[in-house]
């Protein structure tokens, strides 16, 4: 009887260890899956947002990345289409976009995620619209970069950005700074 009890205990302990390991692997897999999906949404979505603000084109594609409520409440997007944007006097032909994710966390069982990113547009190429050449400067205004806290929610199995709060303003790119200067202004 002693050998049977030892054998059952041995098998049971190994099954518990196996179940814990499988659970950790499944949890890690779904966590990585969420993080990868969120990274793609952030990278492509925020770049598309900047493109729409600068060029006022393809605004319908923002629905893939942003929740409807966010799109209606975003002042930068509203300014691009109501004529109050700093880029209304220009035809933008290209831009460089840089985004760095500083912190990202999404539990596999959660329906929301939060992250902190830094966004910059170091260069914008384009020219003044000919009808406004006398009124506007030849130099396209610089993009005001910043650090943002972003909230995402899983809507019908798809991640979408629902909130974007700026926590710091980026004054200029790091390669233009003198040694010892701070990049961020709080």
Image (tube, rainbow, N blue to C red):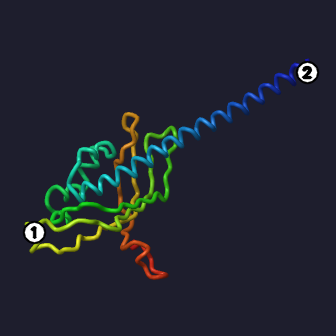
Task: Looking at the image, tell me whether mark 2 or mark 1 is earlier in sequence order.
Answer: 2
Foreground: disc 2 or disc 1: 1
Q: How many marks?
A: 2
**Residue drawn where x is 39% and y is 54% of the image:** 150
- Which dot marks residue 150? none
- Of 170 and 74, which appears nearest the observer? 170
- Which dot marks residue 132? 1
Quarter of the image where one finds residue 56? bottom left
Above or below, 165 against 140 in this view is above
Above or below, 111 against 143 in this view is above
Distance of label 2 from label 1 (alpha carbons) = 93 Å
Q: Which residue is under mark 2?
A: 3
Q: Residues within 10 Å of mark 1 (few under 14, many from 20)?
A: few
Residue 113 x %, y %: 45, 47
Decide if residue 44 is on the left or right side of residue 104.
left
Decide if residue 64 is on the left or right side of residue 16.
left
Element on which disc 1 rests: helix
Residue 25 x %, y %: 62, 37
Decide if residue 159 is on the left or right side of residue 128.
right
**Residue drawn where x is 32% and y is 67% of the image:** 123
């Amino acid at each position: 009887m002693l050998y049977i009890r030892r054998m059952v205990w041995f098998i049971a302990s190994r099954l518990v260890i196996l179940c814990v390991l499988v659970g950790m692997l499944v949890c890690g897999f779904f966590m990585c899956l969420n993080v990868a999906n969120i990274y793609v949404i952030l990278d492509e979505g925020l770049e598309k947002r900047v493109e729409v603000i600068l060029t006022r084109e393809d605004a319908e594609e923002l629905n893939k990345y942003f929740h409807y409520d966010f799109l209606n409440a975003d002042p930068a997007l509203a300014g691009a289409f109501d004529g109050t944007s700093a880029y209304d006097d220009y035809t933008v032909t290209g831009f460089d976009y840089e985004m760095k994710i500083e912190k990202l966390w999404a539990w596999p069982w959660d329906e929301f995620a939060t992250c902190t990113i830094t966004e910059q547009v170091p260069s914008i190429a384009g020219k003044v619209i000919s009808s406004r050449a006398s009124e506007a400067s030849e130099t396209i205004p610089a993009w005001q970069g910043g650090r943002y806290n972003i909230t995402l929610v899983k809507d019908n199995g798809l991640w979408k950005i629902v909130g974007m709060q700026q926590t710091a303003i980026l004054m200029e790119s790091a390669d233009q700074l003198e040694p010892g200067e701070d990049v961020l202004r709080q």
